[in-house]
Image (cartoon, rainbow, N blue to C red):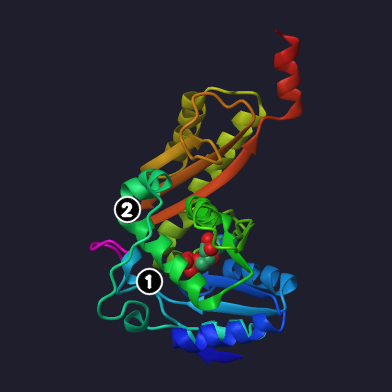
Amino acid sequence: MKILRSPKAMTAWSLGLRREGVTIGFVPTMGALHDGHRALIRAARLKCDALVVSIFVNPTQFGPAEDLSKYPRPIAKDRTLCRQEGVDICFEPTAAGMYPEGFQTTVTVPEISRLWEGAVRPHHFAGVATVVTKLFGMVRPDLALFGQKDFQQAALVRRMIDDLNLGVTLIVHPTVREQDGLAMSSRNVYLSPEERAAAPVLFKSLQAGVAAIRGGIQDGARIQSIMKETLRRHADAAIDYLAVCDPQTLEPLQTVTSQAVLLGAIRIGSVRLIDNMLASRSKTSTTRRSRSK
Ligand code: AMP
């Protein structure tokens, strides 16, 4: 495995391979790699000839009061994981290399960025959209893997690829979870033992929402209150949002007619957790409803 830090060297490597017809897969990350990242890397490995993983803690997607300086950076461990998984290039640009003197262009995806994570973290998605566009420009991948764990981010990247004709195939990988349901995240290391014990409550709350939809409940507000009640019953957590949304637009749904995505963000102590689940009305509940018409 090669480690590259220079954007120019990264692009030169990719263009050389592309000329030979080699397909390039790409997994962008902020490092502190865990089994969720590993699953994305493995899935990418199976779908391409050459594989690039980027490790870059992007300063522009952090708010002033967020955890940029304390974000975990176990680079030696990360490189070992990449080596184990057959990564060809570990791309580790520097902040100065990414945002040199004079840099001024920003990519925004306004509609998707206005909602949920974007409402709580105002500049976050402009930071994400800009850095992903830059990384695509540097790595020139044929396909890129993102995790469902960050559902809104994946929706934003999909929109951006389409809107800007970036020519990258997006693959969204299912969320990888701990045994008790907690979605794996680099930020889980911030949880104290008590907070860690309480953390699966978000998973439980989303599961209760999915069960309600499968059971035939269609009213968005009712599904939302089932999720909130489940959360309150299990832990002392502050809710940023627990929402029943359209999986494409992410707008809240008053009525679930077919598919929904349940989006959640909570705070346990000072640690913020996000998660989501897709839910479909079961065939039986749809049939029951049409029969009773
Ligand atoms: P991050 O390093 O947190 O920026 O994440 C890099 C990529 O890994 C993003 O596409 C995330 O959605 C994805 N990812 C993070 N955690 C998980 C997880 N538990 N399961 C699946 N994908 C994940």
Dot label at residue 121: 2
Give percent across and percent down for residue 78.
53, 82
The quarter in which the C terminus is drawn is top right
- Looking at the image, tell me whether mark 2 or mark 1 is earlier in sequence order: 1
Q: Residue at x 58, y 23 (%)?
A: 218
Dot label at residue 58: 1
Is 123 placed above or below 282 here?
A: below
Closer-to-camera residue (121/72)? 121
Q: Is mark 2 within 8 Å of ligand 1?
A: no
Q: Is residue 280 visible?
A: yes
Residue interval drawn in magenta: 62-67
Q: CA distance from mark 2 to mark 1?
A: 15 Å
Give percent across and percent down for residue 248.
55, 41
Question: In the rendered structure, which amino acid carries the disc numbered 1?
Answer: Asn
* Residue 224 falls left or right of residue 46: left
| Secondary structure predominantly adopted by residues drawn in magenta | loop
Q: Check if residue 280 falls in the magenta segment.
A: no
